[in-house]
Image: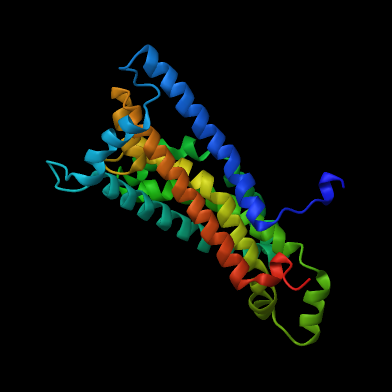
């Protein structure tokens, strides 16, 4: 049987997906053990015990100045910024994308502007945002929104514009207005695509968040990573990076599960 025709069961998918991750972990442990055998004080590849020791104070001991548990404070601050930025970007993408996709005159007028904004590197706008909005939370959230919203708008608009023309004609035959076509025809079909666009935007959103926190912040996962790097504290940096990866994976899994539960027809259920 050709590989293209082979289907993997759920149990085997979990095993096959976990195998490369396990191999990378084993490779890291092997390299770390070799470095520590040559130099017990090596900081570049800390062993699990060293990472546990380095993270213990951040996880379980309150900070002497603030009285907060820094790891959980960093996580909460970053998730709040990410959630707000992703929420604003998603709502903007839905509203603007629907209008651009359904109404050709609006698409012809504002489509080039959205495209122009989407191709601007968002990191290049970071100094402008900090000057215009200050160094507070607004600039950090704005960077996430500017970084992912235009791309999401283009994706939703293109998807809606490619809906079968027969649907639009039938709706108009039944007396539907442009507003009703937008709400009753385009919106339900755009929702699974919107969740898909959110999943694709998670990676860039984390990049913009970490970048903003690294430059101007006093709390957050990105802030902590760039704070301790000056001390070569890989025993803190690596767990923080792994935690960010885990959070991103959980968010992606949640969005995928939500899409399958709410819109099974978009995933081929019943076919």
Vertical relation: 169 (above or below) 190? below
In which quadrant of the rendered view does residue 85 lie? bottom left
Q: Residue 241, percent across and down? A: 42, 38
In which quadrant of the rendered view does residue 49 lie? top left
Q: Residue at x 12, y 41 (%)?
A: 64
Vertical relation: 167 (above or below) 58? below
Furthest toward the bottom, the residue is 174
The colour scheme used to paint the residues is: rainbow
Nearer the observer, 72 or 103 = 72
Q: Residue at x 38, y 46 (%)?
A: 140
104 relative to 251 in the view: left or right: right
Nearer the observer, 57 or 140 = 57
Q: Residue at x 31, y 30 (%)?
A: 50
225 relative to 262 in the view: left or right: left
Q: Residue 99, percent across and down? A: 63, 66
Identify the image quadrant of the C terminus.
Answer: bottom right
Q: Residue 32, percent across and down? A: 43, 23
Furthest toward the right, the residue is 1
Q: How many marks?
A: 0
25 relative to 270 in the view: left or right: left
Nearer the observer, 36 or 144 = 36
Vertical relation: 252 (above or below) 106? above
Residue 80 in view: yes
In which quadrant of the rendered view does residue 33 lie? top left
Furthest toward the left, the residue is 64
Q: Residue at x 52, y 44 (%)?
A: 204
Q: Residue 14, percent across and down? A: 60, 51
Residue 215 in view: no
């Amino acid at each position: 049987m050709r590989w293209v025709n082979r289907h993997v069961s759920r149990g085997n998918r979990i095993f096959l997906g976990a195998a490369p991750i396990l191999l990378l972990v084993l490779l890291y442990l092997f390299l770390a053990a070799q470095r520590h055998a040559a130099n017990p004080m090596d900081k570049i590849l800390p062993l699990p015990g060293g990472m546990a020791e380095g993270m213990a104070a951040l996880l379980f001991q309150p900070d002497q100045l603030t009285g907060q548990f820094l790891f959980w404070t960093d996580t909460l601050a970053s998730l709040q910024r990410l959630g707000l930025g992703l929420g604003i970007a998603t709502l903007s993408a839905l509203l603007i994308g629907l209008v651009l996709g359904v109404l050709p005159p609006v698409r012809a007028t504002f489509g080039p502007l959205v495209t122009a904004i989407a191709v601007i590197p968002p990191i290049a706008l970071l100094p402008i945002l900090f000057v215009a909005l200050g160094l507070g939370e607004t600039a950090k959230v704005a960077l996430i929104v500017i970084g992912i919203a235009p791309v999401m708008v283009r994706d939703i608009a293109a998807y809606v514009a490619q809906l079968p023309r027969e649907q639009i004609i039938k709706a108009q035959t039944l007396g539907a207005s442009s507003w009703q076509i937008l709400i009753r025809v385009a919106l339900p079909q755009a929702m699974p695509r919107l969740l898909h666009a959110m999943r694709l935007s998670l990676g860039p959103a984390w990049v913009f968040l970490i970048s903003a926190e690294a430059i101007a912040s006093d709390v957050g996962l990105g802030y902590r990573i760039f704070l301790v790097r000056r001390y070569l504290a890989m025993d803190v940096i690596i767990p923080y990076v792994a935690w960010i990866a885990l959070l991103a994976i959980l968010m992606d899994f949640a969005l995928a599960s939500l899409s399958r539960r709410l819109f099974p027809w978009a995933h081929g259920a019943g076919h």
